[in-house]
Protein backbone atom coordinates (compact mmCIF):
# COMPACT_ATOMS: atom_id res chain seq x y z
CA UNK A 1 0.00 0.00 0.00
CA UNK A 2 1.10 3.55 -0.53
CA UNK A 3 0.46 6.77 1.38
CA UNK A 4 1.03 10.47 0.82
CA UNK A 5 1.83 13.09 3.43
CA UNK A 6 1.40 16.79 2.80
CA UNK A 7 2.96 18.40 5.80
CA UNK A 8 1.25 21.79 5.57
CA UNK A 9 -2.52 22.14 5.55
CA UNK A 10 -2.28 25.83 4.70
CA UNK A 11 0.49 28.02 3.30
CA UNK A 12 -0.06 31.80 3.30
CA UNK A 13 2.26 33.85 1.09
CA UNK A 14 2.40 37.32 -0.39
CA UNK A 15 2.07 37.88 -4.11
CA UNK A 16 5.37 37.58 -6.04
CA UNK A 17 6.99 35.62 -3.20
CA UNK A 18 8.39 32.11 -3.78
CA UNK A 19 6.55 29.11 -2.39
CA UNK A 20 7.21 25.44 -1.73
CA UNK A 21 4.46 22.93 -0.99
CA UNK A 22 5.83 19.76 0.55
CA UNK A 23 4.87 16.20 -0.35
CA UNK A 24 6.33 12.96 0.93
CA UNK A 25 5.19 9.50 -0.02
CA UNK A 26 5.58 5.99 1.26
CA UNK A 27 5.43 2.91 -0.94
CA UNK A 28 6.98 -0.55 -1.08
CA UNK A 29 7.03 -0.37 -4.89
CA UNK A 30 7.90 2.32 -7.38
CA UNK A 31 5.14 4.88 -7.97
CA UNK A 32 4.07 7.61 -10.31
CA UNK A 33 3.67 11.04 -8.74
CA UNK A 34 1.19 13.80 -9.49
CA UNK A 35 0.23 17.28 -8.35
CA UNK A 36 -3.39 18.30 -8.88
CA UNK A 37 -4.86 21.76 -8.26
CA UNK A 38 -8.44 22.49 -7.25
CA UNK A 39 -9.73 26.04 -7.56
CA UNK A 40 -12.74 26.99 -5.42
CA UNK A 41 -15.94 25.20 -6.45
CA UNK A 42 -14.21 23.34 -9.28
CA UNK A 43 -12.93 19.86 -10.06
CA UNK A 44 -9.28 18.84 -10.01
CA UNK A 45 -6.82 19.73 -12.76
CA UNK A 46 -3.50 18.00 -13.31
CA UNK A 47 -0.64 20.42 -12.67
CA UNK A 48 2.29 18.12 -13.40
CA UNK A 49 3.38 14.51 -13.15
CA UNK A 50 6.50 12.41 -12.77
CA UNK A 51 6.53 9.03 -14.49
CA UNK A 52 10.21 8.48 -15.28
CA UNK A 53 13.24 10.25 -16.71
CA UNK A 54 14.27 13.72 -15.60
CA UNK A 55 13.52 14.20 -11.93
CA UNK A 56 12.56 17.85 -12.46
CA UNK A 57 9.17 18.36 -14.07
CA UNK A 58 7.59 21.67 -15.00
CA UNK A 59 4.07 22.93 -15.66
CA UNK A 60 3.03 25.52 -18.20
CA UNK A 61 2.13 28.07 -15.52
CA UNK A 62 5.50 28.28 -13.78
CA UNK A 63 5.26 25.49 -11.20
CA UNK A 64 7.91 22.81 -10.96
CA UNK A 65 8.40 19.72 -8.84
CA UNK A 66 11.43 17.56 -8.21
CA UNK A 67 11.29 13.84 -7.56
CA UNK A 68 13.76 12.81 -4.87
CA UNK A 69 13.84 9.04 -4.50
CA UNK A 70 16.17 8.95 -1.52
CA UNK A 71 13.98 11.34 0.44
CA UNK A 72 10.74 9.98 -1.04
CA UNK A 73 9.63 13.51 -1.77
CA UNK A 74 7.96 15.39 -4.61
CA UNK A 75 7.84 19.01 -3.45
CA UNK A 76 6.10 21.64 -5.57
CA UNK A 77 7.71 25.04 -6.08
CA UNK A 78 7.01 28.32 -7.79
CA UNK A 79 9.51 31.21 -7.77
CA UNK A 80 6.86 33.95 -7.84
CA UNK A 81 3.18 33.36 -7.04
CA UNK A 82 0.13 35.27 -8.24
CA UNK A 83 -3.19 35.93 -6.54
CA UNK A 84 -4.73 33.55 -9.08
CA UNK A 85 -2.63 30.67 -7.70
CA UNK A 86 -4.84 30.63 -4.59
CA UNK A 87 -6.22 27.11 -4.56
CA UNK A 88 -6.02 23.69 -2.91
CA UNK A 89 -3.09 21.58 -4.07
CA UNK A 90 -3.15 17.79 -3.83
CA UNK A 91 -0.17 15.50 -4.17
CA UNK A 92 -1.04 11.98 -5.35
CA UNK A 93 0.63 8.68 -6.21
CA UNK A 94 -0.37 5.72 -8.30
CA UNK A 95 1.20 2.35 -8.96
CA UNK A 96 2.75 1.72 -12.39
CA UNK A 97 0.82 -1.51 -12.81
CA UNK A 98 -2.77 -2.40 -12.26
CA UNK A 99 -5.58 0.11 -12.20
CA UNK A 100 -4.91 3.82 -12.22
CA UNK A 101 -6.10 4.44 -8.67
CA UNK A 102 -4.78 7.61 -7.14
CA UNK A 103 -3.87 7.91 -3.48
CA UNK A 104 -4.15 11.56 -2.47
CA UNK A 105 -2.53 13.54 0.30
CA UNK A 106 -4.77 15.65 2.52
CA UNK A 107 -4.10 18.75 0.46
CA UNK A 108 -2.42 22.11 1.03
CA UNK A 109 -4.36 25.33 0.74
CA UNK A 110 -2.18 28.01 -0.88
CA UNK A 111 -3.41 31.47 0.12
CA UNK A 112 -1.83 34.30 -1.87
CA UNK A 113 -2.47 37.81 -0.62
CA UNK A 114 -1.50 41.18 -2.13
CA UNK B 1 -12.63 17.73 -26.63
CA UNK B 2 -10.70 17.25 -23.39
CA UNK B 3 -13.60 17.80 -21.06
CA UNK B 4 -15.50 15.71 -18.58
CA UNK B 5 -18.99 17.06 -18.00
CA UNK B 6 -21.19 16.37 -15.02
CA UNK B 7 -24.86 17.09 -14.45
CA UNK B 8 -26.44 18.46 -12.43
CA UNK B 9 -24.06 21.00 -10.88
CA UNK B 10 -26.07 21.07 -7.68
CA UNK B 11 -28.59 18.62 -6.25
CA UNK B 12 -30.70 18.79 -3.12
CA UNK B 13 -32.59 15.66 -2.16
CA UNK B 14 -34.49 14.20 0.72
CA UNK B 15 -33.58 10.91 2.35
CA UNK B 16 -36.41 9.09 0.59
CA UNK B 17 -35.72 10.43 -2.89
CA UNK B 18 -34.15 8.62 -5.83
CA UNK B 19 -31.87 10.67 -8.04
CA UNK B 20 -29.05 10.12 -10.51
CA UNK B 21 -25.78 11.88 -11.27
CA UNK B 22 -24.50 11.83 -14.82
CA UNK B 23 -20.98 12.03 -16.21
CA UNK B 24 -19.92 12.17 -19.84
CA UNK B 25 -16.62 12.24 -21.72
CA UNK B 26 -15.81 12.14 -25.43
CA UNK B 27 -12.06 11.62 -25.23
CA UNK B 28 -12.23 7.91 -26.03
CA UNK B 29 -11.21 7.04 -22.48
CA UNK B 30 -11.98 3.50 -21.37
CA UNK B 31 -11.62 3.98 -17.62
CA UNK B 32 -14.05 6.07 -15.57
CA UNK B 33 -14.15 6.84 -11.88
CA UNK B 34 -16.46 8.18 -9.17
CA UNK B 35 -14.99 10.04 -6.22
CA UNK B 36 -16.59 11.57 -3.14
CA UNK B 37 -15.05 14.71 -1.68
CA UNK B 38 -16.04 16.20 1.67
CA UNK B 39 -15.17 19.79 2.49
CA UNK B 40 -11.47 20.42 3.15
CA UNK B 41 -10.66 16.76 2.38
CA UNK B 42 -9.06 14.95 -0.56
CA UNK B 43 -11.23 12.98 -3.01
CA UNK B 44 -12.01 9.42 -1.94
CA UNK B 45 -12.33 6.78 -4.62
CA UNK B 46 -15.72 5.08 -4.79
CA UNK B 47 -15.85 3.10 -8.04
CA UNK B 48 -13.71 2.34 -11.09
CA UNK B 49 -15.06 1.16 -14.42
CA UNK B 50 -12.69 -0.26 -16.98
CA UNK B 51 -14.02 -1.08 -20.46
CA UNK B 52 -17.55 -0.60 -19.13
CA UNK B 53 -17.10 -3.23 -16.42
CA UNK B 54 -17.02 -2.44 -12.72
CA UNK B 55 -13.43 -3.11 -11.67
CA UNK B 56 -13.22 -1.57 -8.23
CA UNK B 57 -15.86 -0.92 -5.58
CA UNK B 58 -14.27 0.61 -2.50
CA UNK B 59 -16.82 -0.91 -0.12
CA UNK B 60 -19.36 1.76 -0.96
CA UNK B 61 -22.83 1.37 0.64
CA UNK B 62 -25.48 -0.08 -1.65
CA UNK B 63 -27.48 3.15 -1.56
CA UNK B 64 -24.96 4.27 -4.22
CA UNK B 65 -25.36 2.31 -7.44
CA UNK B 66 -23.04 2.99 -10.39
CA UNK B 67 -23.85 2.27 -13.99
CA UNK B 68 -21.81 2.52 -17.17
CA UNK B 69 -24.24 2.32 -20.14
CA UNK B 70 -21.45 2.86 -22.70
CA UNK B 71 -17.84 3.94 -22.89
CA UNK B 72 -18.74 7.66 -22.78
CA UNK B 73 -21.28 7.68 -19.99
CA UNK B 74 -21.16 7.00 -16.28
CA UNK B 75 -24.11 7.32 -13.93
CA UNK B 76 -24.40 7.20 -10.18
CA UNK B 77 -27.86 6.28 -8.92
CA UNK B 78 -28.72 7.50 -5.44
CA UNK B 79 -31.41 6.09 -3.16
CA UNK B 80 -32.19 6.48 0.53
CA UNK B 81 -29.15 8.63 1.20
CA UNK B 82 -28.17 9.99 4.59
CA UNK B 83 -27.26 13.59 5.47
CA UNK B 84 -23.63 12.50 5.88
CA UNK B 85 -23.61 11.64 2.17
CA UNK B 86 -23.69 15.35 1.39
CA UNK B 87 -20.49 16.07 -0.52
CA UNK B 88 -18.98 17.00 -3.88
CA UNK B 89 -19.15 14.00 -6.23
CA UNK B 90 -16.43 14.01 -8.83
CA UNK B 91 -16.24 11.97 -11.99
CA UNK B 92 -12.95 11.32 -13.77
CA UNK B 93 -11.76 9.42 -16.82
CA UNK B 94 -8.45 8.17 -18.18
CA UNK B 95 -7.24 6.42 -21.32
CA UNK B 96 -6.98 3.05 -19.65
CA UNK B 97 -6.83 1.75 -16.16
CA UNK B 98 -3.07 1.76 -15.73
CA UNK B 99 -1.18 3.95 -13.33
CA UNK B 100 0.59 6.21 -15.82
CA UNK B 101 -2.54 7.64 -17.34
CA UNK B 102 -3.65 11.09 -16.32
CA UNK B 103 -7.12 11.27 -14.87
CA UNK B 104 -9.30 14.09 -16.21
CA UNK B 105 -11.81 15.35 -13.65
CA UNK B 106 -15.22 16.90 -14.15
CA UNK B 107 -16.37 19.96 -12.16
CA UNK B 108 -18.40 17.83 -9.80
CA UNK B 109 -21.96 17.67 -8.53
CA UNK B 110 -22.52 19.27 -5.15
CA UNK B 111 -25.03 17.07 -3.35
CA UNK B 112 -26.99 18.10 -0.28
CA UNK B 113 -29.10 15.49 1.51
CA UNK B 114 -31.74 16.89 3.81
Image: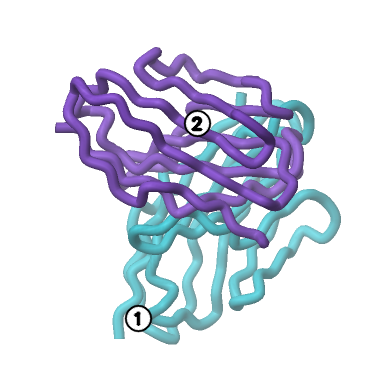
Crowding at mark 1 (Cα within 10 Å: few <14, some 14-19, many 20+): some
Instruction: Identify residue for label 2.
Output: B45
Q: Position of residue B35 (x, y in %)?
A: 47, 36
- Determine the image quadrant of residue B80: top left
Question: Which label belongs to residue B66?
Answer: none
| Image x and y of residue B26, in percent | 67, 51
Marks 1 and 2 belong to one chain: no
Task: Tell me if mark 2 has few (under 14), some (14-19) or many (20+) residues whose alpha carbon lies within 10 angstroms of its own.
Answer: many
Which chain is rendered cyan in the image? A
Chain B rendering hue: purple
Which residue is rendered at x = 33% and y = 69% of the image?
Answer: A111
Instruction: Give above or below for A104 relative to A29.
Output: below
Which residue is pictured at 21% across the width and 40% down the height? B12
Choose top left, top right, bottom left or bottom right for residue A70. Answer: top right
Q: Nearer the viewer, residue A10 or B109?
A: B109
Judged from the image, the secondary structure of the residue bearing numbered disc 2 is strand
Classify residue B72 by image quadrant.
top right
In the picture of the structure, the residue carrying the numbered disc 1 is A14
The chain to which mark 2 is attached is B
In this rendering, would B11 be left or right of A87? Answer: left
Amino acid sequence: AQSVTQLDSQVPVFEEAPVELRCNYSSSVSVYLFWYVQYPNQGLQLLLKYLSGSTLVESINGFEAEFNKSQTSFHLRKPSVHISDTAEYFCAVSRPSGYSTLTFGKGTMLLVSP
Amino acid sequence: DTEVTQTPKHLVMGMTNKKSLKCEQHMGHRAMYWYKQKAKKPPELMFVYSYEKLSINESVPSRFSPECPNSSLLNLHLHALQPEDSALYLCASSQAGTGDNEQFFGPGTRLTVL
